[in-house]
Image (cartoon, rainbow, N blue to C red):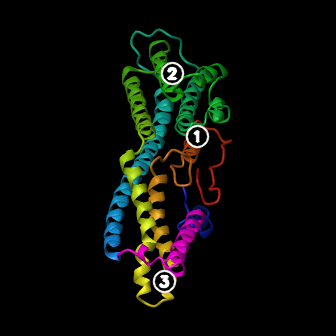
């Protein structure tokens, strides 16, 4: 996610120079054919082209609204992940205690060491879930050893790594752990167990929302025709400007080049902005900063456990927070 208020010109130029060069070459060729070769017939009336430009503007505006909605929904879902993660940690620490009314459970009282182990297992497995969800959405299984494995024991890590959807299975493991704590160890009563399962349901809902956005591409009929219409307008634009500038004088026709390039760049930029916003989980410049959010969750939850040696919050790299 780009966090600087104003986008640096070098960033703009990095993504714009190829299209600007193409527009310049194309407009120059059109002016050469019109003014030097003498092909006056290639000029077209401006009025129908202006009407086309208005129609294209509405169309790409509609597409961009849809693209932004996908990004904003993705950000809201991960905001929910952050909040639900804190809720899970609080319940894990405050519900899982040795003083629990669990009728029918005959188990020795839990020691402080066992409770600490149980707390850490529940919280660490949740941190692993957050990172596993991020890696699944970004298709980055190669980061498992550094981002997920440290929060699981070796056997569980290897088992989860082989799953088709590790995040789903990690929540399933949490549910099994809750059942064990209630039925076998008597560390949860029925109310606490139900409350924590409800939190797991919320996490599944948030995960499903992210997967829905990731696995459902932006409707191709809107994305493809928006691209076609923009480039059709860009192709016709210098032809429509020729006659208008020629009315100002024989040499003014060459003003077609800068004005055509400028208008073409604006329309193409609007189209590109909509395109790169279609999938907010691709780890690109304007996507949801899931890595930073996972690090925030890790810091908050480990601090709740009483740990003091915490990782640093992630800082932007070249004004981009990943």
Q: Nearer the viewer, residue 295 or 287?
A: 287
Q: Which residue is mark 1?
A: 298
Measure how far apart labels 2 and 1 are at the Cα level. 19 Å
Placement of 40 over or under 156, stated as above or below? below
Placement of 20 over or under 127, stated as above or below? below
Q: What residue is drawn where x is 47% and y is 21%? A: 178
Q: Decide if residue 69 is in sight here.
A: no
Q: Earlier in the sequence, mark 2 or mark 1?
A: 2
Q: Earlier in the sequence, mark 2 or mark 3?
A: 2
Do the numbered discs 2 and 1 sit on residues whose CB atoms are within 8 Å? no
Q: Quadrant of the N terminus?
A: bottom right
Q: Which residue is mark 3?
A: 253
Do the numbered discs 2 and 3 sit on residues whose CB atoms are within 8 Å? no
Mark 2 or 1: the one toward you: 2
Q: What residue is drawn where x is 54% and y is 80%? A: 36
Residue range of the region highlighted in magenta in the rendering: 17-45
Q: Which residue is mark 2?
A: 173
């Amino acid at each position: 996610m780009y966090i600087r208020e104003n986008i640096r010109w070098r960033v703009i130029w990095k993504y714009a120079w190829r299209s600007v060069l193409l527009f310049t070459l194309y407009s120059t060729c059109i002016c050469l054919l019109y003014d030097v070769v003498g092909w006056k017939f290639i000029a077209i009336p401006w009025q129908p082209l202006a009407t086309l430009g208005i129609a294209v503007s509405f169309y790409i505006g509609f597409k961009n609204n849809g693209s932004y909605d996908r990004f904003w929904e993705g950000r809201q879902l991960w905001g929910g992940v952050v909040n639900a993660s804190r809720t899970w940690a609080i319940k894990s620490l405050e519900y899982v205690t040795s003083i629990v009314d669990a009728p029918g459970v005959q188990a020795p009282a839990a020691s402080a060491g066992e409770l600490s182990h149980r707390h850490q297992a529940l919280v660490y497995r949740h941190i692993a879930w957050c990172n596993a969800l991020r890696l699944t959405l970004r298709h980055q299984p190669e980061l498992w050893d550094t981002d997920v494995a440290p929060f699981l024991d070796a056997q569980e890590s290897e088992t989860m790594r082989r799953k088709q959807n590790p995040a789903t299975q990690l929540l399933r493991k949490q549910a099994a752990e809750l059942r064990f704590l209630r039925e076998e160890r008597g560390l949860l009563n029925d109310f606490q167990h139900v409350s924590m399962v409800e939190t797991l349901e919320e996490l599944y809902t948030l995960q499903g929302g992210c997967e829905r956005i990731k696995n459902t591409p932006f409707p191709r009929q809107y994305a493809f025709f928006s691209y076609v219409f923009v480039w059709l307008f860009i192709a016709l634009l210098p032809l429509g400007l020729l006659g208008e500038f020629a009315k100002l004088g024989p040499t003014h026709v060459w003003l077609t080049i800068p004005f055509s390039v400028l208008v073409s760049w604006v329309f193409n930029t609007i189209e590109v902005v909509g395109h790169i916003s279609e999938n907010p989980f691709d780890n690109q410049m304007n996507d949801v900063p899931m890595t930073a959010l996972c690090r925030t969750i890790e810091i908050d939850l480990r601090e709740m456990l009483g740990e003091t040696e915490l990782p640093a919050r992630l800082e932007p790299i070249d004004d981009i927070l990943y």
